[in-house]
Image (cartoon, helix red, strand yellow):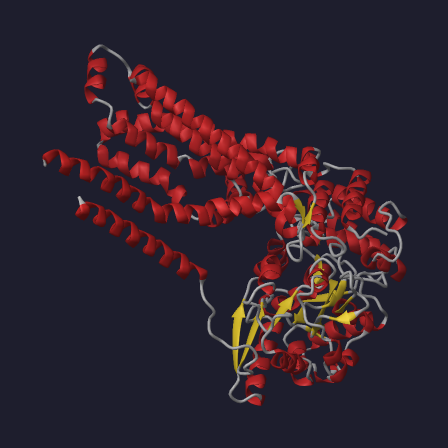
Amino acid sequence: MLKARKRGAGLLAAALAGALTLALSGCGGSDGTTAGDGKTLRLWHYEGPDSAMGQAWAEAVREFEKTHPGVKVEFEEKGFEQIQKTAPMILNSDDAPDLMEYNKGNATAGLLSRQGLLTDLSSEASARGWDKKLSDSVETTSRYDADGVMGSGKWYGVPNYAEYTMAYYNKDLFEKHEVDVPSTFGELTDALAAFKAKGITPLDNAGAEYIAHQYVYQLALSEADRSWVDAYELYQGRTDFHDEAWTHAAETFADWVEKGYIAKNSSGTKAEDAGVAFISGKYPILFSGSWWFGRFQSEIDTFDWGTFLWPGSDLTLGSGGNLWVVPKGAKNKELAYDFIDITMTKKIQNLLGNKGGVPVAADPSAITDPQSKTLIENFNTLSGNDGLAFYPDWPVPGFYDVLVSETQKLITGSATTDQYLDALQKAYDAGAPKQ
Amino acid sequence: MLRRVRGGHHPARRDSYAAFLLPGTLAFLAVVILPFAMNTGISFTDWRGVGTPDWTGLDNYRRLAGDAAFWESFRHSVAMVVAMAVLPTFLGLVLAAALFDYIGKHFGSRWAAVLRACFYLPQVLPIAVAGIVWSWILAPENGSLNELLKAVGLGSLQQDWLGDPDLALYGVMAVMVWVQIGFPLVVFMAGLQRVDPGLYEAAELDGAGWWRRFWHITLPQIRPEIYVVLVWCTIAALKVFGAVYVLTKGGPGGATNVPSYFSFQNFFEKTQVGYGSAVSTVLTALILALALIGLRLQTRAEDEDR
């Protein structure tokens, strides 16, 4: 009897010990690295190794290791969505890297800064001269106030490249069909009509992702000015989605779908497919961002192509690029600052420019590739004229999905332009800070 | 002495059983119960995912009740139940009976096994892979389906299968029937293994054709499997996320939104974590209720059989 009870108790104790062991191992102790050892820089970014940024930053890593003997760079390439969706949780934990690329704007970097998850870089920006290398337009996305609104306040991020939208065009198709490259809005609509008359859909589009609603925003910008943009993006004034600019944009876009300048069946198309379609020579024009430039340079070899800014508009989509941010919990902040500094040097900036990126601080005379030279000169013109108007999805978290969803309805004819603008107004008002 | 020894064993056995259940119980608590409780708690807050949540009581649930997008996503869930539970169960029954009672008999059990494996294959493919392949097949231009229609002279039937708001839900449904059908098929064929073959032989001798054998022998014999499959697939339909995420992202214009994608959107993309939690809490409660009802029906059916 005694023996039997002992055996049962033993089993219970063993099982309990096993369970506790499992539980304890699940907790996961510290990985043992001491804070601030100055020996490792943990870096995360999400640019492909072949992209302009990927190549420039790989060179920056080599430069960093050269100037910091004994310091190792622990680089992890992350997916954009991976960082975008999990960053708040990671930065709030002990797993935060020392330096990472993060998306700019009130709903992203602004959200993190408001929650105190990012290091204030203001004194470093001043001491290392980053603030002088960036124009006002580019600088806007680096600074956030106490409410996480960009444009003023402390520096929480540093862009070392920029981006903007333009029309990419297939020169061969223009020549073949004897269509002139437009320099005014009227000439643009003439060109669209001319292509359509030849049975070609002139404008490449992707309704399932950003490309469609960037057409709409650009059409609005062509009737807008800086104060309109500041009201929309920085909440400095009221945004009325039934004003002249938005009404022109929605009606023109719907009209272009009706006329076949934009394919009605593009509502379910992704950006990647639109880019591939342009690369294959199917569409004469793709209006999209500089992030395609390097890829078009390397992949388009069957026709000649060029770019032009949206005709008749002083404003276009664009901003400083994604930001270098230093998490509040970073263990080696000095190393992070040094790395940012290297990415802002002429050497890295010029490399970025020659690889198809848009540098913020390059020496224009050092850009040897003719297409890249045009890309950067156009950017410098826009930036100098305060023509960067950010992106339409920035003011409100989740507005990207709303813009995609509602613009799809405009493409398929499920919604009238009034319904479209009503829906945008409702979503914008629901998410924008209360005035 | 004999009696005392027997009495002594009884408590030991009880203790032993409890001991073995402990690790599983702890894991279940840590992985299922605790996250669910946390999620339910968050659903009563206004929270952006960082910082301190603000307690707001039932605000998220009141908002949910009046949210047209939420109710539309549930209506789409009904379509998913049709695509992932009703149709696969029906088609699975017919296919299982055909493979077991016709193909297996006339062409050999090896052929039946090969065909069963082919039908089951979509179940083991990662949904992301299947989704991307189907988005290529269903693409409006250069998609395989539209190119095939054009090649056989039916170009006028070409559609924007995933980009037309009137068609997109049916496009996703068609993909889900294909994904799901292998599961009921395999379960039903396993069920058919235990049917007495003598029943089929006797019926055949009495002149019953395939359809009558299906209706009077196959169906009644595998009723328990039918209940299991219906409950399982209905729950899977309510939870569907991956296919919608890969194929349409709830588009175009919300035409294929489903509750779990709606929850995901609010939780991660709009950073309305409290609201996203409320959606998933409602979804979980509904699924639990359906599971309990399913178990009750199954138990009752088994009792009737006894």
Vertical placement of residue A280 versus A377, above or below: above
Apparent side of residue A345 relative to residue B186 in the rendered image (left or right): right
Is residue A259 something one can see in this rendering?
yes
Residue occupying image coordinates x 23% and y 14%: B203
Quadrant in which the N terminus of chain A is drawn: top left
Apparent side of residue B180 relative to residue A341 in the rendered image (left or right): left
Q: Give the residue at the far top of this rendering.
A: B206
Vertical placement of residue A376 versus B79, above or below: below
Vertical placement of residue B70 versus A435, above or below: above
Residue A168 in the image: x percent, y percent? Answer: 71, 62
Apparent side of residue B217 relative to residue A64 in the rendered image (left or right): left
Near-viewer residue (B65 or A286): B65
Residue A375 in the image: x percent, y percent? Answer: 73, 72
Vertical placement of residue B248 versus A77, above or below: above
The answer to which quarter of the image holds residue B286 is top right
Apparent side of residue B206 relative to residue A295 in the rendered image (left or right): left
